[in-house]
Image: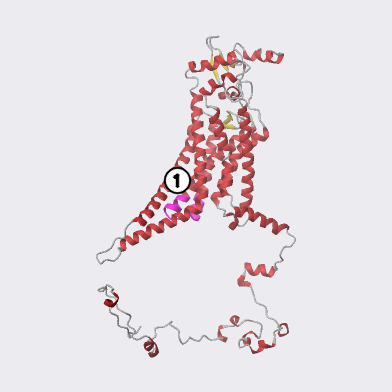
Amino acid sequence: MDNATLAALADPLRGQCPPPFYDISQFGLDGFVTGRFCAPVDYIKKGLICCLPCPLTDYLYPPEFNTWYRAAEALNVAGLICLVFLMATFLILPAEKTRRHYLSYCLIIAAMFMALGFVIPFGAEPEQCYDQITPNDMYSSLTCAFSGAFLISGGLSIAVWIFIRALSMHLQICWDVTPGKKFFYWAQGLGWTVTATFFTITITITGVSFRFGDVCHVNSEHSMKDFWGPLLAIAGGAMVIQLVTFVYCIKVYLQNMWSDDKTETHSSAGLPSYTGSVRTRSARAVYHRVRKVLWLQWRGITIVVFILVDVIFFSVVFIWLNSLQTHALDDPEELQPYLKCLIMSPLNPEPCLQYGQELAINQSTVIAILIMLSIAGLQVFFLLLRWSMLTGWVEFFKSKFSKNREFVSLDAKNYQEHPKNYELRKFEQTDLQSPPHVFSSPDFASHRDGTPDYFQKETERPYRSPTQSYSTPRPFSQGTIAAYPRVEWDPRSTHARGGLGLHPPDFDSKI
């Protein structure tokens, strides 16, 4: 062993604890004390408490875990860039190119908050530990405070706006109700108010700290009632609404299929049943309406499903992690294989990682959480992106930097904006360079002063009622009766069914 290794093993802060553990009595109460992982070791000395070194992830997961963590943060950087591009597209390009909607704006903002929670520590590379056994929290690290705040606000706002989006689609698909201004104001008020309320409660009562990796997560104590409970309630409500919408769509599809397969019922007179035909037409009309809405809203439905899976999955995993850490010291006998392995191999914890992951969450699950959180922004970007946006940007830059830009008169622009204020100019007789045959035109007299005839006053052209006008009841003339003589029709000659009270039109009667 070299001198540095020997000095680390002989660190006086270890006290009577065997390496790699440290004696808790050698440290103060600064930093996030609750985040220490310590246990009593009475068989060495009565009242001796030894703690694992910080960061704890170095003794639970292999070195490639940090590589996966950096990769997840890089994905968030890419997602943030894409979201900024999408937001700029919505703000700059016209609406017909982007199909923008306030629900999309709010979801993009929420995803940007989530991405910033990973991007900030990616650039700052903060120190996770306050001392050898104590992690930093939001009070001892400013980077931790900002990354945790953005992560909490992003998770809450994504869940809230996914719920509102699911509710909006449910109203359109199931109830044929298009949300209007009232829904907009209620959505904006409740959406951001709920997010701000639970964010304030979580950040002030529960707090955030470096639990694993260089991103601060919600602390375990009080987190269930302050953060995870409300988050799961909102996500669960959105899931229920989405499932009800799916069930309704399946019901409409089956009704339409059965209406096509049903044999047509007839009334006692032998005609098709009016009630059955109306029911069939109604089912088909609802089916066509639902299919049209689904075709227009498939992006929103997919976003809701993907984000709900992400939110529910990482919520359940974090609740499970909190439970494991809370009850880890309830049975010291379960810790003995892991602790003995670390004592036998203080400088190389890799042989002991399998025992440590049995007590916590395995590496595959943690990496899955990180990747799912990291691709949330990319999911929103690709599902809201349209080909028309890219063509819109091409047209935008061509219009700004093209040398052959078309000149548009200011008068023409004003006419397009205010057509009622447009006034046709009168030209002098010398300005009219008309060919000679125009003077023989029968309607040239109406254009002699340069103004079309339909701009003249109504008194100059009195209205004359046409001779064949049907605006008032008139009796048939003799010529009309002669042109349409009375026709006698025998239903037996065409094998038609009689007795229905149908008669040919009687042109002798007056209208």
**Tag 1 residue:** 242
Q: Is residue 115 magenta?
A: no
* SS assignment at label 1: helix
Report the quarter where the N terminus lies. Answer: top right
Q: Nearer the viewer, residue 345 or 123?
A: 345
Which coloring applies here?
secondary structure
Q: Residue 61: which quarter of the image?
A: top right
Q: What amino acid type should be assigned to the residue bearing mark 1? A: Gln
User: In this view of the protein, can residue 90 be seen by the observer?
Assistant: yes
Q: Is residue 20 above or below residue 73?
A: above
Residue 276 drawn at (x, y percent): 32, 60
Q: For mark 1, does the 10 Å Cα neighbourhood hold few (<14), some (14 to 19), or many (20 or more) residues?
A: many
Please determine whether, in this image, residue 316 is positioned above or below residue 507: above
Q: Is residue 178 visible?
A: no
> Who is closer to the viewer here, 296 or 153?
296
Taking depth in this image into account, of 69 and 267 the one nearest to the observer is: 267
Task: Name which quarter of the figure residue 481 lies in.
Answer: bottom left
Count of picture labels: 1
Residue at the (62%, 81%) spot, across then down: 452
Residue 247: x percent and y percent? Answer: 40, 47
Looking at the rendered image, the quarter that the C terminus falls into is bottom left
Please report the residue visible at 38 percent of the width from the left and 50 percent of the height from the top: 251
Residue 274, given in percent of the width and then of the height, sits at: 31, 63
Residue 33 drawn above or below residue 189:
above
Q: Name the side, left or right, on which 223 lies relative to 277.
A: right
In this picture, residue 19 sits left or right of residue 163:
right
Please provide the residue range marked out in magenta: 168-186
Q: Main secondary structure of the magenta part?
A: helix
Q: Residue at x 50, y 55 (%)?
A: 181
In the image, residue 169 lies in the stretch drawn in magenta: yes
x then y, percent, for residue 336: 51, 15
